[in-house]
């Protein structure tokens, strides 16, 4: 029953201040954009995961504001991010495996 009270309070807050929740999502998206850009700039594959999380946030913003054009664009971006993760991760994993095999044969 306690959970129901919290849900009611959140609903009342949402009804009084509908932009309150959106402001938080905008701020989260802004921070995720900055972090992902820095990580990708440093050639870290984790930046693509952060960018994907940001695209999910933008899709939620698009749903809440009925700006539905954000959704297909960011779903496309998520597909590109997945492709980039696979491309960035595969060579390093292969090189590590080959290095391990070479070191194993030299001992």
Image (cartoon, rainbow, N blue to C red):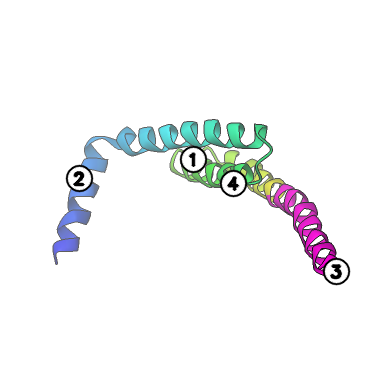
Q: Are marks 3 and 4 in contact (CB under 8 Å)?
A: no
Residue bounds of the magenta highlight: 82-107
Question: In the image, residue 55 lies at what x, y percent?
Answer: 57, 43
Which residue position is annotated with label 1?
66
Disc number lying in front (2 or 4): 4
Which residue position is annotated with label 2?
12
Horizontally, is 66 left or right of 37 in the view? left
Q: Are marks 2 and 4 in contact (CB under 8 Å)?
A: no
Majority secondary structure in the magenta region: helix
Q: Quadrant of the C terminus?
A: bottom right
Horizontally, is 89 left or right of 17 in the view? right
Question: In the image, residue 80 lies at what x, y percent?
Answer: 72, 46
Mark 4 crowdedness (10 Å alpha carbons): few <14, some 14-19, many ≥20: many
Measured in 3D between alpha carbons, the distance from the residue under mark 4 to the one under mark 1, in whole angstroms, is 21 Å
Q: Residue at x 80, y 63 (%)?
A: 103
Mark 2 crowdedness (10 Å alpha carbons): few <14, some 14-19, many ≥20: few
Mark seen at residue 105: 3
């Amino acid at each position: 029953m306690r959970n129901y009270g919290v849900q009611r309070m959140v609903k009342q807050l949402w009804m009084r201040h509908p932009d309150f929740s959106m402001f938080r999502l905008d701020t989260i998206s802004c921070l995720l954009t900055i972090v992902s850009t820095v990580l990708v700039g440093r050639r870290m594959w984790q930046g693509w995961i952060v960018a994907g999380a940001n695209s999910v946030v933008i899709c939620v913003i698009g749903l809440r504001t009925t700006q539905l054009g954000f959704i297909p664009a960011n779903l496309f971006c998520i597909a590109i991010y997945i492709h980039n993760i696979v491309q960035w991760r595969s060579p390093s994993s292969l090189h590590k495996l080959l290095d391990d095999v070479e070191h194993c044969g030299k001992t």
